[in-house]
Each structure stands twice: as structure tokens, then as C-alpha cells.
Image (cartoon, rainbow, N blue to C red):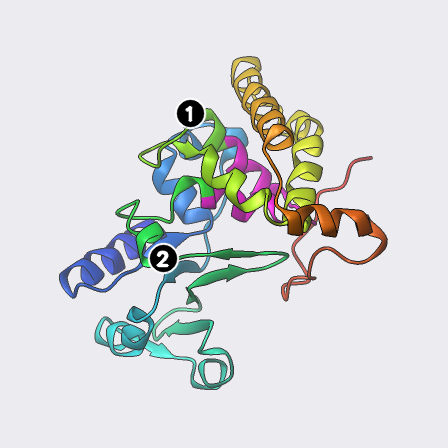
Amino acid sequence: MVNMRAECERILEAAGKQNVLLRVIGGMAVHLHCPTASHLPALSREYGDLDFVTASPDDQRMRAFFESIGFSANSRFNALQGANRMIFDCKECDWHIDIFINKFHMCHDIKFSHARLEQDPVTIPLAELLLTKFQIVAINPKDVKDVAALLIEHPLGDTDRETINVPRILEVASHDWGFYTTVRMNLEKMPQFLEILQLPATETKVIAGKLDELGNRMEAAPKSAAWKMRALLGKSIPWYEEPEDAARGELKLE
């Protein structure tokens, strides 16, 4: 079995040596920031493929970089999607690397600049990492576990260093009614999802407190004119995109 953390660290070390901008996203990013994700049985999960983010112009170096460390480009996919996303396959094993370029696109878009990616030396910033989970309309058990781990181990604050930068979350949500709406929906669902995980009471209390604080700050934050205009239409028209991965195993409340 492939040790995905070791593979991730090998790739990051090589990227550092070659001065290639590469930051981890997804479950492995949570794992690297949250020892709790490994130690609490309720939050344990498997890690399959690895996901990274880069920003232009470093995207032009991806093929040469990954081929230099033993991966092969998925030529067909990269030819069609290479402006926004690239895939590199492990030559010896049945797994791959997904590279998002300048933005993470799923139900909503999360944009990344060089400056934002440089706020954390290993992963995307924690604010954006939390948003990658909360922007999913059909949130699944892995997403809920990742949210729980992030909120247990990191304070809400106004910086990025091992802190969930709330002003950054408000910047995104207060300018995009659709994004705001999806995040608020998931904030409201989380307490019931947490009951399914059966975490210790102390951890559940910590998470609940931070969910309440984040929700209150989102509601109170000033909204842009574009946000207010879109709010007039409400949910009468779609406010999110269906993700390409249709088999995510959505969590549903009974």
C-alpha cells in the first residue's frame, strides 16, 4: 500500500528544491495540519489521490516537474483542461495527482493568487481549506470529518498562520450570494452531522462554538451590491454548479 503522506512530502520537498509553487489541497492538507485527524477514531479516513494547487506562471512548469519525479502526464485530459486543471499519473501504482491552476472549481470557485498561496508553506491557507469543504452542496462524510478536524485544532482569527482567517472567509462570502448560501446551509447542517460522528462531548462543544461564531460573523458582515442583487432572485434559479464527480456519497439527514 502506498504511503500517501510520504508521497506528498516527497513531492513537496522536490518542489521546494526546484522552486516550484505547489500547495496541498483536499483531505491530505487537513491531515498535515491536524494530528487529531489521525488520532481520533471518529475522524480517521483514507487518503487516495493527491491534490495540489498552483498559480500562474508556475503552471507552465508542471509537466517538466512531475515527469522529473517519476509521474506521467495524462495527455488527453491536460490537452482539454490544462488551462485550469492537470492530471499526472503514477507510473507504478493506480493513483494520480490532480493540479488545480489559479482556482479550485467545484460547486463554487475559490480563486488563488501567488500571494494567497504563499501564506502557508505547505497547504492552501486554512480559510480556503475550510471553504473547499463548506462550498460543497452534497457534503459527504469525509468532508464533515475534515471540517471537524480543522475546527477542533485551529482558532478562528484574523491571520493565516495556523489560524482560520475569518476576514478572508467573509471577503468571499459577502461578495457571492451563492457561495454564502451554500456555506450557511452547511453550517446549519453540521450539528446534526456531528451527531453521526459521535465525537467526544468536549470536541463537539468546541466545534459548535466556532460554527456559531462563523455563522454570526457571516450574517453581520456588510454585503456587496452584487450580493444583494443576486439575493433578490434567491433559490428560484440555481446558485451552484453540479460537480463533475457525481459519486461523492452525500450525507443525508434522516
Looking at the image, residue 54 sits to the left or right of residue 208; the answer is left
Q: Quadrant of the C terminus?
A: top right
- Percent of width and height locating residue 89: 39, 73
What is the secondary structure assignment of the residue under circle 2? loop
- Of 63 and 93, the residue lying toward us: 63
- Of 147 and 5, the residue lying toward us: 147
Q: Please give the range of residues in magenta.
A: 128-148
Does 130 lie within the magenta span?
Answer: yes
Q: Tell whether label 2 touches label 1 (CB within 8 Å).
A: no
What's the mark number on residue 182?
Answer: none
Residue picked out by circle 1: 155
Residue picked out by circle 2: 2
Q: Residue furthest front?
A: 225
The answer to whether 208 is drawn above or below residue 182 in the figure is above
Q: Residue at x 54, y 30 (%)?
A: 42
Q: Residues within 10 Å of mark 1 (few under 14, many from 20)?
A: some
